[in-house]
């Protein structure tokens, strides 16, 4: 009886604030705002005016947006185009971390063959390797071999390196997708907690009175 009475009072008087953490929603980077000559490109996924993801190249000529042409399956112009003569050809930093998976489409200015591929290596903040993959570029509806990288991993990624093998020294990527750390939404719902508390109070209050009458 004493326990039920205390529970009744606590549930009725107290108002609990619930915080619902919704599953992280993947963000998509399309590079539509990229300008030729940039040596870095930033993406702000949560609108706080602070970049969450930054792509950089050591090529002083920067990126290009001319692209490989029409009929690409994984590339929607303009994309991000660069040279494949560096090591690495492209670096991506996740300022708030990346989790679960990353994917992107690529195309290469090259012939099709075993030496035409895209490689992606992922690291944590201590430089430890989290995952890596390599995909061949394959001729399809376009004149340029292309493909898609899909990398699933555990842990939190801090940065990744991308290398491309191309006969004529160019690559392009597009539709870079993943959970970049800033896409998780936290919502406060105090009203639901109040209703829940009142409901508990009514239930246990009723039980208390019934037991008292007995």
Image (cartoon, rainbow, N blue to C red):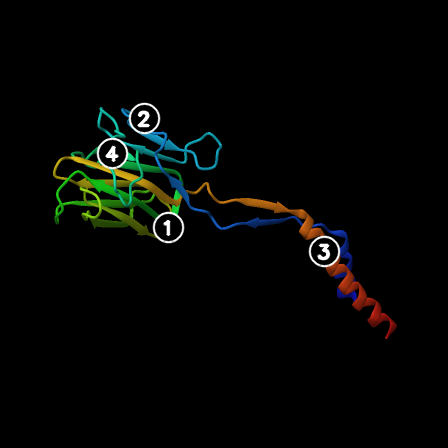
User: What residue sits right under mark 2 in the picture?
Assistant: 35
In the displayed structure, does residue 55 sit left or right of residue 171? right
Q: Which residue does the image show at 47% across and 37% down from the upper left?
A: 46
Give the mark toward the camera: 2 or 3.
2
In the displayed structure, does residue 25 sit left or right of residue 207? left
User: What residue sits right under mark 3 in the picture?
Assistant: 197
In the displayed structure, does residue 93 sit left or right of residue 18? left
Observer able to see residue 119: yes
**Percent of width and height locating residue 208:** 81, 67
Q: Residue 155 carries which label?
A: 1
Dot placed on the residue nearer the N-terminal end, 4 or 3 = 4
Q: What element carries label 1?
A: loop
> Which picture quadrant has residue 60?
top left
Residue neighbourhood size for the residue with mark 4, other residues' Cα within 10 Å, grouped as few (<14), some (14–19), many (≥20):
many
Mark 1 and mark 4: Cα distance apart in space: 33 Å
Dot placed on the residue nearer the N-terminal end, 2 or 3 = 2
Mark 1 and mark 3: Cα distance apart in space: 37 Å
For residue 170, above or below residue 102: above
In the displayed structure, does residue 35 sit left or right of residue 199? left
Residue neighbourhood size for the residue with mark 3, other residues' Cα within 10 Å, grouped as few (<14), some (14–19), many (≥20):
many
Dot placed on the residue nearer the N-terminal end, 1 or 4 = 4
């Amino acid at each position: 009886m004493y326990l039920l009475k205390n529970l009744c009072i606590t549930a009725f008087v107290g108002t609990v604030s619930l915080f619902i953490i919704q599953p992280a929603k993947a963000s998509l980077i399309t590079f539509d705002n990229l300008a030729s000559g940039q040596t870095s490109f930033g993406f702000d996924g949560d609108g706080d005016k602070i970049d969450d993801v930054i792509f950089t190249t050591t090529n002083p000529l920067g990126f290009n947006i001319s692209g490989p042409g029409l009929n690409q399956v994984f590339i929607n112009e303009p994309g991000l185009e660069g040279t494949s003569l560096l090591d690495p050809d492209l670096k991506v930093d996740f300022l708030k971390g990346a989790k679960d998976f990353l994917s992107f489409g690529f195309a290469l200015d090259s012939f099709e063959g075993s030496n035409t591929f895209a490689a992606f290596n992922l690291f944590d903040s201590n430089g430890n390797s989290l995952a890596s993959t390599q995909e061949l570029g394959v001729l399809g509806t376009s004149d340029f071999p292309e493909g898609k990288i899909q990398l699933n991993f555990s842990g939190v990624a801090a940065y990744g390196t991308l290398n491309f093998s191309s006969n004529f020294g160019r690559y392009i990527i597009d539709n870079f997708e993943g959970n970049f750390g800033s896409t998780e939404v936290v919502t406060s719902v105090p009203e639901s907690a109040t209703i829940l508390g009142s409901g508990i109070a009514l239930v246990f209050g009723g039980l208390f009175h019934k037991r008292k009458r007995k």
